[in-house]
Image (tube, rainbow, N blue to C red):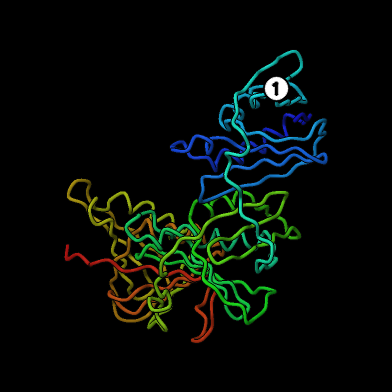
Amino acid sequence: MKFVISRNELATLLSKLQNIVSNKQTIPVLSNLLLEASNDELVLSATDLTVGLRCYTDTKVVEEGATTLPVRHFANLVRELTAVNLEVTCKEGNITEIVADSSRFKLHGMSRQEFPALPDFEGAARFVIKQKVLRDMLYRTSFAVSREDSRYALTGLLMRISNGVATFVGTDGKRLARAHVSLEIDPEFAGDYIIPLKAVEEISKNLIDDADETSTVYLLEDRIAVEGNQINLITKLLTGEYPDHNRVIPERSEQVITLHAQELASLLKQISLFTDDNSHSVRFTFADGELRVTANSMDVGEGHVSMPVNYHGARLDVAFNPQFFLDILKHCKQEVISLGITDAYNPGVITDGDTLPENGEQPSPLYVIMPMRLSDA
């Protein structure tokens, strides 16, 4: 194998592949990437057996062939080089020589036969979606995915396809984020796909915020692939039953309050400095025309902040985790949000905009935050 490639192009591809490879591989070849050169095209692949990434780029192939190289050593070397173009040659014994102007380096690789084959998606169900839309769906929901291994299914993002709509759901049991988008797919097609968080993050990194660029999503029973921008990301799906998220979304709220997102975020950042290390709870008190937010800690002290709101009625107290609320505000894009609440014991419902939809409608995105126990202090 022998090819010539732009150093910048190769460095960009290697930076993407590095994210896939784990530092704690028990199988030596999984610390390597696979290089395949043929027909003036270079294909680079990496996998951790759960998530795999395949990158394609045009290059000048002098001699076709394939090998594997330790991805971190290779990437670090390429990043430090200053030559415009690199000449890469695989010789006998999977020893690869990299020539950069007057500099020469040799890296010891492994046979391509030892590298696990990435699956074929021929015949898989598929749909095409704008990259900007898919990226937004993942951004709006993945932050709520659980980071705790105790609830395995919740460590992934649910993508549910039904009636021509893809619904994305992330939850850790304390908050929930849901968004949906219509698809050009057979309305009879249905399926649930729990995507590992690592794969969600890698997919998001490789999508571009362009109104015209599209990706193709391939669907198999145990894995999916997202293809676009000369990149194909493949991931196994998590097994297990995802809980019925619709059960935790209140059908209606007694009060709907409009809140200025940026002002509320500023107040929550201030008041969160006074939360107790154990409870991480702040009290929201709604009174006529005003929201007061309070917190106190034996170790730190206490804080009181307030802002005007469109609330009119009897005093209503409810406690929320300020960081969870801030996470939701961060992923809202409108100037104001709507908070639907009933009492101190039922979940709060947040939508990005100045109204909650009428009953029966499917808002997107929608966020649910569970209340915390109110302190008498």
Q: State the image coordinates of residue 374 (x, y, percent, origin top left).
A: 22, 67
The count of marks equals: 1
Residue at 73% across, 29% down: 7
Residue at 73% across, 49% down: 230
Q: Nearer the viewer, residue 116 or 210?
A: 116
Q: Nearer the viewer, residue 178 or 82?
A: 82
Quadrant placement of the N terminus: top right
Determine whether 7 is above or below 219 in the image.
above
Residue at 40% across, 81% down: 253
Q: Amino acid at mark 1?
A: Ile
From the image, tell me which residue sits under label 1.
Answer: 98
Q: Nearer the viewer, residue 112 or 150?
A: 112
Q: State the image coordinates of residue 35 (x, y, percent, origin top left).
A: 68, 37
Determine whether 361 is above or below 10 in the image.
below
Residue at 59% across, 65% down: 220
Q: Dividing the picture into quarters, in which one does residue 284 lie?
A: bottom left
Q: Dividing the picture into quarters, in which one does residue 58 lie?
A: top right
Determine whether 170 is above or below 72 in the image.
below
Visible in this render: residue 353?
A: no
Determine whether 273 is above or below 164 in the image.
above
Q: State the image coordinates of residue 207 (x, y, percent, origin top left).
A: 65, 53
Secondary structure of residue under mark 1: strand
Residue 290 placement, left or right of 213:
left
Q: Residue furthest top?
A: 102
Residue 311 placement, left or right of 200:
left
Quadrant placement of the C terminus: bottom left
Label 1 neighbourhood size at 10 Å, few (<14), some (14-19), many (20+)?
many
Visible in this render: residue 347?
A: yes
Q: State the image coordinates of residue 301 (x, y, percent, origin top left).
A: 22, 49
Residue 354 placement, left or right of 254:
right
